[in-house]
């Protein structure tokens, strides 16, 4: 299955790939929107090196994302050492694509830099212990990571997020020598898709299920979910995944505490990493 590029996909085709039969009304369109709609996660990479300067370009794109009050409470660590990548794969449910990709980025929620600045100036940072401060840092990191993904895909590269980094945040922190007030919130594989590895664009919920006007809710939600389940079951069959549908996967993923893979202890771990979360 070849990956269609935005240049070879019309607006109607791109919307049909993303929504199946529930195509929203046509609106403004350009190549940037086409690129966004063509996103898919890739879990197999060639060992080919990335062009010189790619890392710096991706970070420039990441730093161009919005950041709350310009606090810039995130950082990133580029990991290319094979032994270290193997350790990250082990800590992330043995996801082999972490070892395959030429560039593995770990995005950090990072309030330590601002704390060091305050310490040097003898200023007490009264907001540091609060949950809001951690949320700002985690959101900043996510916005930066998504900008990096878009930049990489615009250059013909593939990516996949690694949320399983949060299964073992303290061990990830030790591997990266993180100071107090930093946490790896997710990883990101960047590289060129291996031959024969090409996921199709995965359909999303119809817009009516997630977009509301003036107040929350849609009385047609059960019907919308049922239709989406049918769409996803068809996608799963075409992708060799059996008859898996969306609601069944959600119930399986969120119905058992074991699915959190240890993340149910996150608050205690974060407090040990310098986020009091008051």
Image: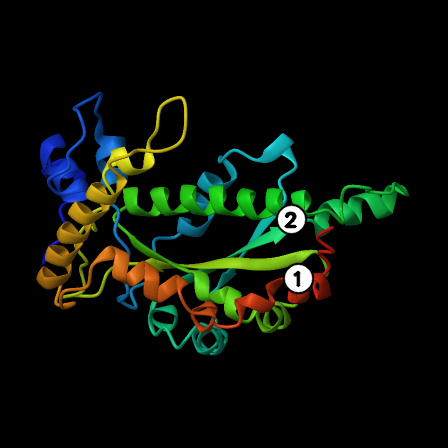
> Which residue position is annotated with label 1?
270
Q: Quick one: label 1, few (<14), some, or many (20+) residues within 10 Å?
A: some
Q: Which mark is residue 195?
A: none
Q: Is residue 191 visible?
A: yes
Mark 2 neighbour density, 10 Å: few (under 14) some (14–19) many (20 or more)? many
Q: Choose the circle earlier in sequence order: 2 or 1.
A: 2
Seen in the picture, residue 41 relative to 115 is either above or below; the reply is below
Q: Secondary structure at mark 2?
A: helix
Mark 1 residue element? helix
| In the image: residue 153, left or right of residue 146 | left
Asked whether, in this view, residue 275 is left or right of residue 79, the answer is right
Q: Is residue 129 left or right of residue 99?
A: right
Quote the CA–CA distance across marks 2 and 1. Answer: 10 Å
The answer to whether residue 236 is above or below residue 57 is below
Q: How is the image coloured?
A: rainbow
Residue 29, image x, y percentages:
21, 24
Please give the name of the residue rendered at 76% of the width and 46% of the height, measured from the top-left corner. 128
Query: What residue is shown at x 28% (from left), y 52% (from top)?
Result: 157
**Depth order, front residue of 210/74:** 210
Q: Residue furthest right?
A: 122
Vertical side of 34 occupied by 28: above or below: above
* Of the pair 58 and 209, the residue shown nearer to us: 209
Circles 2, 1 touching at the beta carbon (< 8 Å): yes
**Which percent across, then down, holds residue 8?**
10, 39
Residue 38 seen: no
Percent position (x, y) of residue 108? 57, 54
User: Looking at the figure, which quarter contains the N terminus?
Assistant: bottom left
Nearer to us in this view, 236 or 9: 236
Q: Is residue 113 left or right of residue 24?
A: right
Residue designated by label 2: 134
In the displayed structure, 207 sits above or below 175; it is: above
Residue drawn at (30%, 33%) of the image: 218
């Amino acid at each position: 299955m070849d990956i269609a590029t935005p240049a070879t996909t019309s607006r109607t085709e791109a919307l049909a790939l993303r929504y199946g039969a529930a195509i929203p009304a046509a609106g403004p369109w350009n190549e940037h929107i086409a690129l966004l709609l063509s996103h898919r996660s890739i879990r197999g990479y060639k060992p080919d090196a990335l062009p010189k300067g790619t890392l710096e370009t991706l970070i420039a794109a990441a730093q161009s994302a919005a950041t709350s009050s310009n606090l810039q409470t995130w950082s990133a660590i580029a990991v290319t050492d094979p032994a270290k990548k193997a350790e990250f794969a082990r800590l992330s449910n043995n996801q082999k694509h972490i070892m395959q990709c030429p560039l593995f980025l770990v995005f950090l929620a990072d309030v330590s830099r601002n704390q060091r600045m305050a310490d040097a100036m003898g200023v007490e940072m009264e907001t540091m212990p609060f949950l809001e401060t951690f949320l700002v840092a985690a959101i900043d990191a996510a916005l930066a990571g998504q900008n990096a993904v878009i930049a990489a895909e615009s250059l013909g590269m593939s990516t996949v997020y690694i949320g399983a980094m949060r299964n073992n945040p303290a061990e990830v922190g030790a591997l990266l020598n993180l100071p107090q007030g930093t946490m790896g919130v997710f990883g990101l594989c960047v590289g060129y898709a291996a031959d024969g590895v090409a996921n199709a664009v995965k359909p999303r919920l119809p817009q009516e299920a997630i977009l509301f006007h003036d107040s929350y809710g849609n009385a047609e939600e059960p019907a919308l979910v049922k239709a989406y389940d049918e769409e996803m079951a068809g996608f799963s069959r075409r992708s060799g995944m059996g008859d898996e549908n969306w609601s069944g996967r959600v119930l399986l993923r969120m119905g058992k505490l074991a699915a959190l893979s240890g993340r149910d202890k996150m608050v205690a771990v974060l407090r040990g990493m310098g986020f009091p979360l008051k």
